[in-house]
Image (cartoon, rainbow, N blue to C red):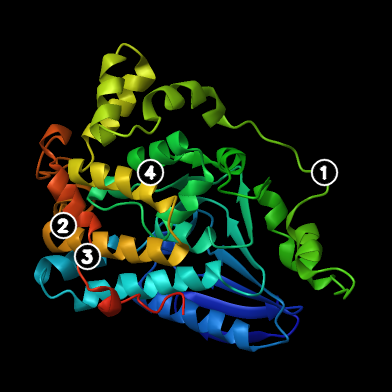
Amino acid sequence: MSTQGLLRAAPEVGFEIVNRVAIVTLDRPHAMNALSHDMIALLADCFATCAEDDAILAVVLRGAGDKAFCAGGDVRKLYHTARNDPHHATPWLKFFIDEYRLDYTIHRFAKPVIALMDGIVMGGGMGLAQGAALRIATERTRMAMPETRIGLLPDVGATHFLRALPRDLALYVGLTGASLSGADAKRIGLADECVPSTWLRGFIERLETVRWNDAQDAMTQLKRVFVPSANIERHAPLDELRAQIRRHFTACATGGAERIAASLAADADNEWSHATLATLQSHSPTMLEVTYHALLRGRQMSLADCFRTELGVVYRAIDDGDFVEGVRALIIDKDQRPRFAPTTLAEVRAERVQHFLSSPWRKEMHPLADLCA
């Protein structure tokens, strides 16, 4: 337990200080720590406290339970809010605004943030973890950005943090929602270390023994707590797919996601190509094309502009896109038969893609206009 005691307890978010390090726990294990709006507000309060308190040297983000760090946002609740009043955007839009502000805070946080990505890390969980200064994966990590399945794009800063990957890998991860292991994540730059899950169980005891030394920065000392001295490099399954991913997902000036699908279709005798094509065909065609272009644009944009673009796309996807139908088919009714409109990539018009990528707000009226101020 904490050497200084529990600073504050709140439903669904735990906050304690151990030897000058804040331990922030996503505590909703029955829902795999999926983010509710209340949790986002509490997390923002935690980071504000940590920023203001000079006695706090660093922040650790972890998930409660043994299944997940964070499985994303509370999509079910967002669905009901949007479905009941789709054109009254205030409640669901405020969720995304506050979530993106929190993610941006973590990216720009002045003190080291350590994210323990043990178990499932998806969607909103990636938004929390990818801004951390030290991202720790384990052999239990299952990482994904599956938003195109439900009619959204990979958001929470994904158009920014996926640019750390080669273009073909960024497109593969963003379009297919492929699940990555902890070793995969480290290999491609979405984790800084991959350690045994059992090693993380004793991190508080190790943290309590740290004697902070002004001659060493906090991160150097923290790495000794979270990374074993003899850490074994694990096999990354994604390595075996790199040639095929590069062949089919290499960015092209024309064609977009439709060209990728055509390339996979021409190689349909290959089991992986056939399965990957089937995956794309089950996702929102509109959001596949929007995601393709958003990921490529994001490679040239600032972090703040990436969040602003993502918010505009999400606004349009919920207001007049495929989100409600995608969530209905995959999460609510679970019939796995979404009626996306249009139904195929060939039917997605360039004007429709541009509609999603253009901001619904004038520059000065954007809800995140002040993000880099």
Using the image, tell me which numbered label, if any, was put on residue 324.
2
Say whether residue 276 is left or right of residue 125.
left
Q: Say which element carries label 3.
A: helix
Which of the two discs, 3 and 4, labels the residue nearer the N terminus? 4
What is the quadrant of residue 106 in the picture? bottom right
Q: Distance between the residues labelled 4 and 1?
A: 33 Å
Q: Earlier in the sequence, mark 4 or mark 1?
A: 4
Q: Position of residue 48 (x, y in %)?
A: 54, 84
Q: How far apart are marks 1 and 2 (CA)?
A: 48 Å
Residue 218 in percent (x, y) is at 78, 70
Q: Name the residue under label 1.
A: 230
SS label for mark 2: helix
**Disc 3 crowd, CA 10 A, few/some/many (<14, 14-19, 20+):** many
Mark sitting earlier along the chain (1/2): 1
Amino acid under label 2? Val
Please name which of the two marks, 2 or 3, marks the residue nearer to the observer. 3
Quick one: label 2, few (<14), some, or many (20+) residues within 10 Å? many
Q: Name the residue under label 4.
A: 174
- Residue at image point 69% right, 50% down: 198
